[in-house]
Image (cartoon, grey):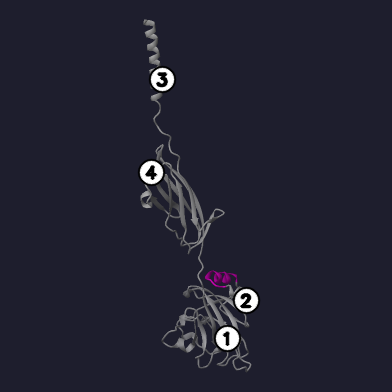
Amino acid sequence: MKKLFSKLFMVGALGGLTLLASCGGDDDEPTPAGPSIVVTTTPAAVDGVISMTTDDELIISVNASTPGGFNTATLSGAVTVTETRTTLGIDAGATSADFSFDPIVFNNAGTATITVTVIDDIIVDGASQTTSETLTIEVTEASTPANVFTAKLLYAQLASEDSKTFFSTNLGETVSKNEVDASAAPNSSDIDFGYAAGATGTVFLASPSSYPTFTGYDLSIWNTLNTTTFKNVTLTDEEYLAVETDLDLIALYEEGTTPEDRKTGFEAGATFAFQLDADKGSKKGLVKIIAIVDGNSDGDIIDSVDYMEIEVIVEQ
């Protein structure tokens, strides 16, 4: 009987140990997976690069999976932004989130990088769980529509000095010497170039600083004698009509040849890229000689009815 009791006690004790072993295991739950993100942008990336201009807005949108609960999203690099679940209106413990950062505008051209990071609520080894993606952005200068002045007539210089011989790009008007000499506007600082005609049929397009003296016009009394630099350019009609922006004008001036502050010996159809005086911002432009007209058909172009028709395109 004693032996039977002892055996039963031992079995019961072993059963108790088994029960204790099964109930006394590790109570820790598995650590939730770290966050993951899918980032989309407007404009969209092409071959891994986002291309935009200084006029564009970059919008970064994020679809985040956060099994450990969404905590914070940041942008770093070219910009620094921090958004919490509170600022984004995301519930505590949320295991997913869709949101967009405020639009970003780049004021300067160049290459930029922005790193998008999402952080969850889980601390592992003293640090939050995070995931990141880095964006590459190529920013170019935005183009600005150029000012276009058509059918502008520059008349031959006259002894009376009242013919509209000069042109001002900031006014977009033709101006006579008498008007400049008067105390009221327009002023000499407004004048960018003028037309001069020789008795032999030679024509000039000249800066005030190098206006031909044979005209008899004394510009030394002007307070300002601007220097406009002209360069030769050759354009087809189609290429000329395609010139629309400041970037077009800048490129043409850079490609032009033979810089001079006055041009002569040209004919109708000629085009010149130009750069205004530094005091007028060194703006770039293009002038096309539409026609050189002998108004009274007397064989010369120095009469009051003789003129040169031009079109002018200039940066704003």
The reply to whether dot 1 and dot 2 touch (C-beta < 8 Å) is: no
Asked if the residue under mark 1 is in contact with the one under mark 3, i.e. CB atoms within 8 Å, the reply is no
- Number of the label disc, if any, that sits on residue 93: 4
What is the x, y in percent for residue 282? 50, 73
Circle 1 is placed at which residue position? Answer: 308
- 82, above or below 290, in the image: above
Mark nearer the N terminus (2 vs 4) = 4
The numbered mark, 1 or 4, whose residue comes first in the sequence reads 4
Label 4 sits on a secondary structure element that is loop
Q: What amino acid is labelled 4 in the image?
A: Gly
> Which region shows up in magenta?
243-255
Q: Nearer the viewer, mark 1 or mark 4?
A: 4
- Give the mark nearer the N terminus: 3 vs 1: 3
Instruction: Inspect the image, locate mark 3, and give the three-letter code of the amino acid beneath it.
Output: Thr
Q: CA distance from mark 1 to mark 2?
A: 19 Å
Type of amino acid under label 2:
Asp
What is the distance, in whole Å, between disc 3 and disc 2 at their CAs?
97 Å
Q: Residues within 10 Å of mark 4 (few under 14, many from 20)?
A: some
In screen coordinates, is 171 left or right of 87?
right
Of the numbered discs in the image, which one, if any, rests on residue 18? 3
Q: Is residue 250 magenta?
A: yes
Q: Main secondary structure of the magenta part?
A: helix
- Name the element at disc 1: strand
What distance separates the C-alpha of mark 1 from that of mark 4?
77 Å
